[in-house]
Image: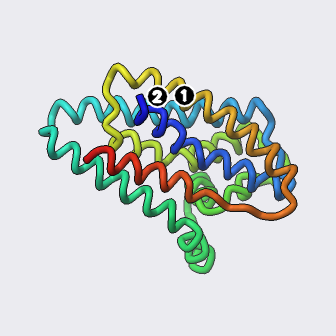
Amino acid sequence: MFQACLLALAVCMDTFWGAVSCSMNGITIPKRCALLISTVGTVFLSISLFCAQLLHGIFPESVFRYAGFAILFLLGSTQLMKKILTVLFQKHRPHWNWKALGLVIDICFDETLADADGSKTISMKEAAAYATALSMDSLASGLGAGITAPRIPICLGLSFVFGFILTVLGCRVGTSCRKQINLSWLGGVMLLILAFCRL
């Protein structure tokens, strides 16, 4: 139960800090978009968790456990170094041939780029790209977390609720903040805790 709750919270932390960042830059995320963001994130996580169940039946438990540790450890470490990776990306930002894919990748490093039309309000189309970008780590996290089948519905339910609440809360926090704060590394810490739980 602890792992299911921690995984759901960890994969939703990006949506919270993304909403904070957008709000501090004057970008509004309507509640209907927050609902879409939460839904997309939960769908990504469900695909990952069910794939993990299939793989669990193929590979030995020891292999699956250590592979899960490696995946979560890598994701957690990447989250901790996100600020450095973002600076490097912005210095060497490539040109994308596929604009939709390029937008998703850009949002991974700067959530405010979700407002592609500069309207200062995230549309449903922009929310879909935003949600896809922030849910990419859910695909790998679910594979590595080792959540048992009976806990999957709980994890997905929590992911949906956390995703919506944290997006709305992030918008409010960003509006009230006068100074830029960045605690996005908390998600990385949670993933590292999950990684060591796998051992």
In the picture, the disc for residue 155 is 2
Q: Residue at x 64, y 40 (%)?
A: 128
In the picture, the disc for residue 52 is none
User: Can residue 119 be seen by looking at this rendering?
Assistant: no
How far across and how far down the image is residue 38, in percent? 62, 33
Q: Is residue 13 above or below residue 168?
A: below
How far across and how far down the image is residue 196, in percent? 33, 50
Q: Residue at x 42, y 43 (%)?
A: 139
Q: Residues within 10 Å of mark 1 (few under 14, many from 20)?
A: many
The quadrant of the image that shows the N terminus is top left
Discs 2, 1 touching: Cβ within 8 Å: yes
Q: Nearer the viewer, residue 73 or 44?
A: 73
Count every numbered label the image shows and give the total: 2
Q: Amino acid at mark 1?
A: Leu
State the residue position of label 1: 158
The quadrant in which residue 192 appears is bottom left
Q: Nearer the viewer, residue 157 or 108?
A: 157
Q: Is residue 161 above or below residue 63?
A: above
Helix, strand or loop status at disc 2? helix
Q: Amino acid at mark 2?
A: Cys
User: Can residue 70 be seen by looking at this rendering?
Assistant: yes
Estimate the spatial distance between the alpha carbons at disc 2 and disc 1, rounded to whole Å.
Answer: 5 Å
